[in-house]
Image: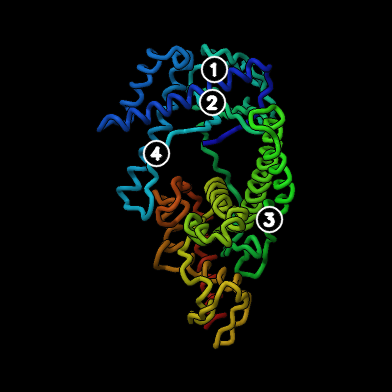
Amino acid sequence: MLVLEFKVRAKKHQYLAIDEAIRTAQFVQNKCLRYWMDNKGVNKYDLNKYCRVLAHNFEFANKLNSQARQSSAERAWSAISRFYDNCKKKVPGKKGYPKFKKNCHSVEYKTTGWSLDNNTRKAITFTDKKGIGRLRLVGTYGLHFYPIESIKRVRLVRRADGYYCQFILSVDLKIETEPTGKAIGLDVGLESFYTDHEGNKIENPRFLRRGEKKLKKLQRRVSKKKKGSSNRRKARQRLAKKHLKISRQRKEFAKRVAYCVVQSRDLIAYEDLRIKNLVKNHCLAKSINDAAWYQFRLWLEYFGTKYGKVTIAVPPQYTSQNCSKCGETVKKSLSTRTHVCSCGCKLHRDENAAKNVLKLGLSTSGHCGTWLTDSLNAWGDDASTLTEVILSKQATSVNQESPTLLALRLVVGVSILHENYLTNG
């Protein structure tokens, strides 16, 4: 799936119509959730049928496109099915019981209710009764390269700096690249964004920390304004724009670094971290969220699938404590930044962890299986990310790889294992 996003230019009454469509979608989603709570045994198809009942009972719901109402019902069912899955898997802690939406920011159409401008494809017209009409699309992406039939969803999104239109296309992007014959082990951290097994580091940008002074100033301005006033609304808008800017900086940084890593390596091994558990440490929660490790992992898996590279998530247990040379466990606290072992190995804590991560990625047993075996069996249905079920959306692998790439990966794997044997004994 490919998502193309455009900024929307329209008139004031059209923006108000988009807001009304978003509120209606939120209403339908909440009513479907209530219907599921009040009736035992309701399934996904019952919620879709219930959308017709809502359209009959509420005139404003009838004005929204029928498939847009179904999309809202599917959102409600997505939360319900996630709750069921967590209960079946016996996930520790809270199971994520579905909650009513308070501030919805988007409305999603399927294949009806809209039409693209056939000539320029720089404008879209929504044909339902909400009165949105023709919207001008501003962006550098070209929709001419994709057939109209490949557009499966159209989503209108409201953000702090305006309105956006997203096109979800059913396109299989796989790009052939020249094998580099290299592998890399990554250890993410707070001191540096990541450290690889060769000791190379990427500086942690800390976007939230750098913009925190400005955020506090804008927050004080919001608190001083009278509730319900126009000045308070404007102050909240400025604060929201600053938060959005920081979020975009963090996303762009993770995307750029992940792209560079995938382009320079054939195999990427990284830790399978549970961020939800890590942020329970209130002393480090802000810094962990600011580092965006999870977003970095998502981009690694996306680019790995796109360019046919192998991405392996390994268990993070004892990667910092075990010696990468002899395997002996050397206990150390978070404040201890240097790994010193009785075997004579002395290096930075993160570099030691990165070496262990790469070893686990290349190992023939354990959590993630063997890279060499998976490369030779690349004609199968294995996922590109070899790990336990941690992410809700796992990346899919390239089902077929060229024999040259497979042979090269085998040679590279053997050479790396031989080099480790000569180094570590």
Measured Cα–Cα span from mark 3 to mark 1: 41 Å
Contact? badges 4 and 3 (CB < 8 Å): no
Nearer the camera: disc 2 or disc 4: 4
Q: Type of residue at label 3?
A: Arg
Measured Cα–Cα span from mark 1 to mark 2: 8 Å
Q: Type of residue at label 1?
A: Trp
Give whichever of discs 4 and 1 has the lower sequence position.
4
- Name the side, left or right, on which 84 lies relative to 423: left
Q: Toward the viewer: 235 or 367? A: 235
Contact? badges 4 and 1 (CB < 8 Å): no
Looking at the rendered structure, the secondary structure element under dot 2 is strand
Residue bearing the label numbered 1: 114
Q: Position of residue 202 (x, y in %)?
A: 68, 61
- Identify the residue shown where x is 53% and y is 50%: 301
Q: Position of residue 25 (x, y in %)?
A: 48, 24
Give whichever of discs 2 and 4 has the lower sequence position.
4
Measured Cα–Cα span from mark 3 to mark 2: 34 Å
Residue bearing the label numbered 4: 98
Looking at the rendered structure, the secondary structure element under dot 4 is loop
Q: Toward the viewer: 178 or 80? A: 80
- Name the side, left or right, on which 370 lies relative to 151: left
Residue bearing the label numbered 3: 206
Looking at the rendered structure, the secondary structure element under dot 1 is strand
- Identify the residue shown where x is 39% and y is 38%: 98
Contact? badges 3 and 2 (CB < 8 Å): no
Contact? badges 1 and 2 (CB < 8 Å): yes
Measured Cα–Cα span from mark 2 to mark 4: 25 Å
Label 1 Cα neighbours within 10 Å, binned few <14 / some 14-19 / many ≥20: some
Residue bearing the label numbered 2: 154
